[in-house]
Image (tube, grey):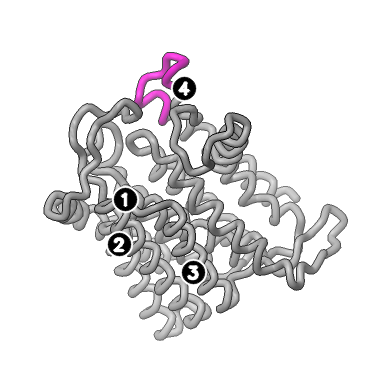
Amino acid sequence: MLVFFLIFAVALLTTIVFTPLASKLAHIFGAIDHPNERKIHANDIPRMGGFSIFIGFIFAAGVAIACNLLGILHFDLVLFSAIVAAAFIILGLGIADDIWDIRPEVKLVCQIIAASLVISFGASIDFISNPFNGLVYLSAFAFPITLFWIVGITNSINLLDGLDGLAAGVVGISSAALFFVSLIKGQSEVASVILLVLSGVSFGFLFFNFNPASIFLGDSGSYLLGFLLAVASVIGALKSTLFVVFIIPILILAVPILDTALAILRRIFLRKHIFQADGEHIHHRLLAAGFSHRGAVLAIYICCIILSLIALVLITVL
């Protein structure tokens, strides 16, 4: 457990140290979020938080790799390296979008490329378990289903990033919960390490991102967090032969999944492009219902914590 604490601490502290630099770089490159009728904030805010999150991820990943080479940890170094490479692709996409506003179709293609990379190295959902402990092997459907999950969760976190600290906090809570699931069930150490690092970088970023935020995740941060969370869940809980373990990530990630599903259905019903932004997400509805900015964020945090606790109880008693 000491090595896990070290990895978490490196991710947390490195992100805290490098976030002010990310803010300066955002100003230099013009990655600034300006207020408009859809935005909650009233001032210009830098939005390249993915830079410091990636630095925190790389430093912590370096510690994990060193521990692997020393025999302290044991995980698939090839798969881990593929995930790091794919994360770099996602970071580059996000930073480009933070600066230049990339077309949705281009972003989707880049996400598919990054997802395809990790899938090709073994991060795939090869079967689905059922309540009767039977397995349904996906065969040719494994690739498209895994691709749908990774790209879907990546964009779910991006869509959730509408209030200060919301997406980072949800990812921090969710990844911490999935990490404990991974420990309890003895799942892949690749998943455990990534989830631990995710929790560390997310909570580290919250020092600057919680209301009132001095920096935003931007697409560079939200895409990166969502992508790594999706991949870790694939190589962890979603590879379990037990049905109760298989549904755990869906339960823990219920808030962003539900928010995205409702957004897509709403836009289809209103005959809008599914990538067209609107002000009807869960956090917008909480604000409209009278919640304060912090109150809406904390309410969603509480929902995520409750769902995560339910998941952990299910894991321990079943």
**Within the magenta stretch, is there residue 68?**
no
Q: Is residue 306 visible?
A: no
Q: Identity of the amino acid at label 3?
A: Ile
Give the residue pinned by disc 3: 113
Q: Are marks 1 and 4 in contact (CB under 8 Å)?
A: no
Q: Earlier in the sequence, mark 1 or mark 2?
A: 2
Give neighbour class at mark 3: few <14, some 14-19, many 20+ (Cα, 10 Å). Answer: some
Instruction: Identify the residue shown where x is 43% and y is 48%.
Output: 172
The correct choice, above or below, for 1 with respect to 23 in the image is: below
The correct choice, above or below, for 263 with respect to 107 in the image is: above
Give neighbour class at mark 2: few <14, some 14-19, many 20+ (Cα, 10 Å). Answer: many
Q: Are marks 4 and 3 in contact (CB under 8 Å)?
A: no
Cα distance in 3D space between marks 2 and 4: 32 Å
Q: Identity of the amino acid at label 1?
A: Asp
Instruction: Identify the residue shown where x is 72% and y is 48%.
Output: 317
Image location (x, y in percent) of residue 180 = 55, 55
Cα distance in 3D space between marks 4 and 3: 35 Å
Give the residue pinned by disc 2: 56
Cα distance in 3D space between marks 1 and 3: 19 Å
- Residue 286's disc is 4
Secondary structure state at the residue bearing disc 4: helix
Report the mark closest to the observer, 1 or 2. Answer: 1
- Residue 101's disc is 1
Q: Earlier in the sequence, mark 2 or mark 4?
A: 2
Q: Identity of the amino acid at label 2?
A: Gly
- Residue 265's disc is none
Q: On the picture, is 184 further left or further right than 35?
A: right
Q: Specify start and end residues of the magenta stretch as a single range.
A: 285-297
Report the mark closest to the observer, 2 or 4. Answer: 4
